[in-house]
Image: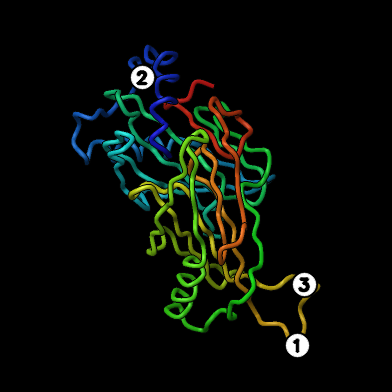
Amino acid sequence: MHWSNRLICLFVVSTIIPYVLAADPPVASIKSSAEERLLYMQSGGGSYSVKVGEKGTAKFQKEPVLRFTNPVSGVVDGGLFVWKDENERPVAAAQIFICPGTEKLWLHEFQSLAMEPMKFEYQGRTAWAPKSAGIKFESISNVSEPAKSAEARLVQMRQITRRFSVKDDFQGASADELRLLTTPLVRYNNENLLDGAIFSFAHGTDPELFVIIEAQKPDSEKTGKTQPSHEWRVALAPMTSYAITAKLDGKDFWSVGWRQAPHAITATFVDLEFPPRR
């Protein structure tokens, strides 16, 4: 999310305010308490039915991984939430917040973290259906194999994230250096995954880019006596529609261009008013 969401909100306000005012249950507003706004965020996030791939499902995680404000954009309260699949891996993230300049117009800003297509349904209607994977993992060089202890692996993951530098670009007019938040937003594992964590580069405390690091098993064709049991891999995912560039050790590593709203329902990143109409 970026301070430019003011522009998105202006677009949304002009088209859906009558619908929002008629919404049921009552919509929390900037005049509501922080607890009431959180309950409304949780209610909205939990209202989606999520399918991953052909047979998988995902569950909304009720507790926000981050509660944020953005004085530059005017966001007075927002929550970052994730959905996890049946293996406890995060497959989607959403920032849920009141549009700046409005009293109770809520925006759900989604990014796919899945490695396959997925579908979010609201009251039986498709709200968001990214048709491709939201992330792609890549191996990185000059890194030790994953340590045996969880504490040591966290140190390794932080060392990896510090090798990145990230900028986002507001409509080609300015480039902001983003700040690394060294505390992971989410940490997870399962029987096939030794360790995983999501870090973020932020505008203030507002995440703009996710750095997802996992200790994965090597590809089967590479497995052999000299291969480690797990290796570090990295995937990046934006949490803004504006252009982002990421460097690793000072060299170009990843980038995404500006994706102007309104976003296609099949895109891996979308801004949706809530409740969704489509």
Residue 207 vs residue 56, the one in the foreground: 207
Q: Residue shown at 53%/43% (left/top)?
A: 111
- Occupied quadrant, residue 192: bottom right
- As helix, strand or loop, the secondary structure at mark 1 comes to loop
Q: Residue shown at 56%/45% (left/top)?
A: 112
> What residue does disc 1 label?
225
Q: Is residue 14 visible?
A: yes
Q: Residue shown at 56%/58% (left/top)?
A: 247
Q: CA distance from mark 1 to mark 2?
A: 61 Å
Residue 109, labelled with which disc? none
- Expressed as whole percent of the image width and height from the top left, the position of residue 212 reads 53, 59
> What residue does disc 2 label?
23
Q: Nearer the viewer, mark 1 or mark 2?
A: 1
Residue 45 vs residue 145, the one in the foreground: 145
Counting residues from the start of the chain, the first of labels 2 and 3 encountered is 2
Residue found farthest to the bottom:
225
Q: CA distance from mark 2 to mark 3?
A: 51 Å
Counting residues from the start of the chain, the first of labels 1 and 2 encountered is 2
> What residue does disc 3 label?
220
Residue type indicated by callout 1: Lys
- Expressed as whole percent of the image width and height from the top left, the position of residue 200 reads 44, 55
